[in-house]
Amino acid sequence: MIVADAPTTLEDHPELTMVRGPDQLPVTRIRPLREGLSANDAAYVVPAEALNATLLTSDRRLASAAARWADAETV
């Protein structure tokens, strides 16, 4: 989510909570995930894993592959 859009999104979806993650993506974690993910896909999975959050994606392949490391749902 783009930070500037957060207030509107949270007003429209009160069931969502927002947690600000670390400012730095742990890029050293991306490389070990290469067996099942591209570097781009891993860049989405790593924060979800680090925050113990559910990765929401419209990409069914990504959700399936990401499930090895983090909760993932296709929306």
Image (cartoon, grey):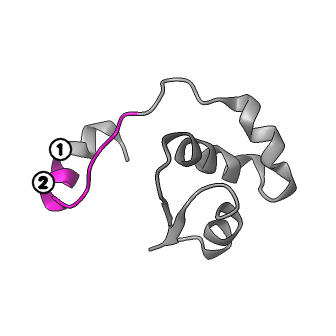
Left-right relation of 9 to 37: left
Mark 1 secondary-structure assignment? helix
Residue visible at 76% across and 46% down in the picture: 39
Q: Return the x and y of residue 68 as percentages of the image width and height.
A: 70, 61
Q: Residues within 10 Å of mark 1 (few under 14, many from 20)?
A: few
Left-right relation of 13 to 51: left
Please state the extent of the stretch shown in magenta in the rendering.
7-20
Q: On screen, 21 above or below 13?
A: above
* In front of the other: 8 or 14: 14
Q: Return the x and y of residue 38 as percentages of the image width and height.
A: 78, 53
> How far apart are the two marked residues, 1 and 2, measured between alpha carbons?
6 Å
Q: Residues within 10 Å of mark 2 (few under 14, many from 20)?
A: few
Q: For the C terminus, give its image quadrant.
A: bottom left
Toward which corner of the image does residue 6 lie, by quadrant?
top left
What residue did someone put label 1 on? 7
Mark 2 secondary-structure assignment? helix
Q: What label sits on residue 11 in the rendered view?
A: 2
The amino acid sitting under disc 1 is Pro
The amino acid sitting under disc 2 is Glu
Q: Return the x and y of residue 60 as percentages of the image width and height.
A: 61, 75
